[in-house]
Amino acid sequence: AEVKKIAVIAGDGIGPEVVGEAIKVLKKTEELFGYKFELEHGLFGGIAIDEKGTPLPQETLDICQRADAVLLGAVGGPKWDNNSKELRPETGLLGIRKALGLFSNIRPAVVFDCLKDASTLKPEVLEGTDLIVVRELTGGIYFGEKFRREGAGGQEAVDTCVYNVQEIERIVRQGFEIAQKRRKKLASVDKANVLETSRLWRETVNKIAPEYPDVELEHVLVDNCAMQLLRRPSSFDVIVTENMFGDILSDEAAMLTGSIGMLSSASLGEGSFGLYEPVHGSAPDIAGQGISNPIATILSVALMFQLTFGYAEAAEVIERAVKQVLDAGHRTGDIAVDKSQAIGTTAMGDLIVAAM
Amino acid sequence: AEVKKIAVIAGDGIGPEVVGEAIKVLKKTEELFGYKFELEHGLFGGIAIDEKGTPLPQETLDICQRADAVLLGAVGGPKWDNNSKELRPETGLLGIRKALGLFSNIRPAVVFDCLKDASTLKPEVLEGTDLIVVRELTGGIYFGEKFRREGAGGQEAVDTCVYNVQEIERIVRQGFEIAQKRRKKLASVDKANVLETSRLWRETVNKIAPEYPDVELEHVLVDNCAMQLLRRPSSFDVIVTENMFGDILSDEAAMLTGSIGMLSSASLGEGSFGLYEPVHGSAPDIAGQGISNPIATILSVALMFQLTFGYAEAAEVIERAVKQVLDAGHRTGDIAVDKSQAIGTTAMGDLIVAAM
Ligand SMILES: CC(C)[C@H](C(=O)O)[C@@H](O)C(=O)O
Ligand SMILES: CC(C)[C@H](C(=O)O)[C@@H](O)C(=O)O
């Protein structure tokens, strides 16, 4: 089989541990399906600041650029929180998104059976919740001009939110296309009653909507969406929105499932290239103890197989193995009801590999 | 007693009905306490568009400007949703906030006993939830320069988010002061890892925090706050944030209480002047049927008494009357378990007046 190059960025905190288990899954897939993966490791985030003086070394970017996909653990931690902007892990994250042209962030928010009770929402409200937030990732107020100046009311800070039709079209089309493969409902979220970028967003959505006549479209104002996610989460299928709104709503959606420790995400560009990472962060408080949950990262591999490599069967094998291990009652500490029965990171990874 | 001037803006949809009941409460307060209120009515929102060709006629602004406080019902409805920007009710809302200098929006999110089960959150998570969102209301991306231009990627829209130290200080001080009168916890919400305005926000908060040593301060990133509101709502006391984040988070907070139909809000400027309104909207679908719930508007009068007039006792009398009527089992349709037993808008108003 063709060799697929994967850039592996373990990052900070629990990143290296969970990525370690995901690599075992990659190796098992090679055995089972005859696929070939070539892994190249890169430094990124806090560890790159410590070792290379920058959160995103050129070398790491080169590794990503010659790869077919990137597997990322997690970045950040209190150690770097008070650094100047250039020396913060987040700056690396924004930098890698922009440099790799990852304009689309796909965050499925699903409820895992074994975690139904972990949600703070009532089970009957949560029932059937299975949605995807498609977030624009390289535009908007994240990347517009930012500066300080002196004004009449003292120092003044400015952020600029910019979107053009092309940027809006490509992300909205992705929203429509994903919806076409699912329950065919798209909620486009904006604040068109206040923002000019949102008015252009809504016009653009309406302009291309006729090309997807099979998808039921609704426009939802961002404040209303924050409410509706709570009131009727299961009624959403695909939500497409701009960068800042997507940041907020995808976290709200993930949290309401109760399954945040199990959720994976993909950041995609043009073509099939993608960066895959668990939604949970670097969890510095439990790093190095071998107790973190590798499932979100392992499921990120399954997402990579689906979206970048087209290895649908292998993706299914991974997902089924995860389900089987959970159904058999195995839990890491974060998802265990009886913490004394919890297993560690490696044990969980091994069980999943064995179940494949 | 000194005559207090109240500008009454009934607005659209159910606005006139609910405001009608609030006026009965004002009259009853005059009787009970010897206060004197002089009401002046103004057109605003959709009805003003229809009758005067603008959502905020100068005459209405004049009425508000010579008043001590404003009581607002609700504005907007599908009839005006597709109008051009100048002819939309929201434009009037933004205009009145700016013209009256209402830089602070206070939104208490409390759980009403009788509505505990209306929330989609589990009762044990909701238990003890009683928070206030203090939202900056006349700055940020709402009021910064907005325009379109042609660019390489087609038409381009731009919104500008601007904050100066003075604007941040006055709203943050209000947050601290409200917290001092409550459980002494302030969560300041920003996106300081991405936005320059948020970095200035956080610096300013940290600069003035030492003046409020009795208040426990935490900085929370907006995406994390959207999650924490779901995970631990009762741990929040006062949340202070900028305009756009406040719009989203105050709606999320209101919805999670399950009591959104009962919540009041205040928009304050310098001094004691304030605009008071229910959090629920104009509910065009049930307008004119006499079935809407006037409690949020009646409680907005109580808030006006507290915050603008310093009529603490009268405020308490209203709040107690509402509680008494609810405890006696009376419900409007929106909060009735058995809809066939629901009473109408006027009946609810009359019962509350009688209980005063
Ligand atoms: C760390 C931060 C810059 C980042 C973002 O806001 O995009 C994070 O919250 C995310 O959602 O990936
Ligand atoms: C109608 C709209 C302009 C307004 C806002 O965003 O401020 C509303 O959502 C609110 O919160 O009062």
Image (tube, coloured by chain):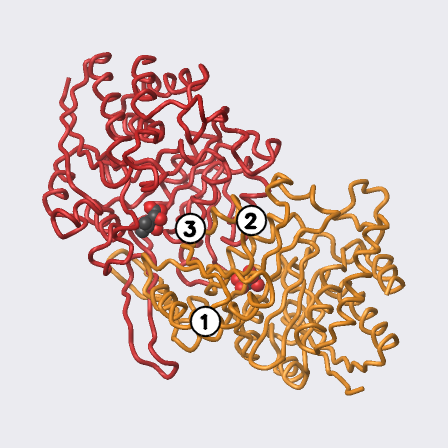
Chain colours: A red, B orange
Query: Is label 3's Cβ within 8 Å of ligand 1?
Result: yes
Q: Which residue is mark 3?
A: B223
Considering the image in quadrants, where does the C terminus of chain B appear?
A: bottom right
Q: Amino acid at mark 3?
A: Asp
Please provide percent x and percent y for residue B141: 42, 66
Chain identifier of the residue bearing label 2 in the image: B
Circle 2: is it few (<14), some (14-19), or many (20+) Cα within 10 Å?
many
Q: Amino acid at mark 1?
A: Gly
Q: Are marks 1 and 3 on the same chain?
A: yes
First along the sequence among labels 2 and 1: 1
Check whether the beta carbons of the residues at disc 2 and disc 3 lie within 8 A of each other: no
Q: Nearer the viewer, residue B60 or B36?
A: B36
Q: Amino acid at mark 2?
A: Pro
Please provide percent x and percent y for residue A269: 25, 41
Please provide percent x and percent y for residue B188: 45, 61
B114 with respect to B123 (left or right): right
Q: Which residue is mark 2?
A: B233
Mark 1 and mark 3: span between their CA atoms?
21 Å
Q: Quadrant of residue A326?
A: top left
- Does residue B83 appear anywhere in the picture? no
Residue displayed at 39% across by 69% down: B146
- Does residue B39 appear anywhere in the picture? yes
Please provide percent x and percent y for residue B82: 55, 59
Label 2: state its secondary structure: helix
Q: Which residue is mark 1?
A: B139
Label 3: state its secondary structure: helix
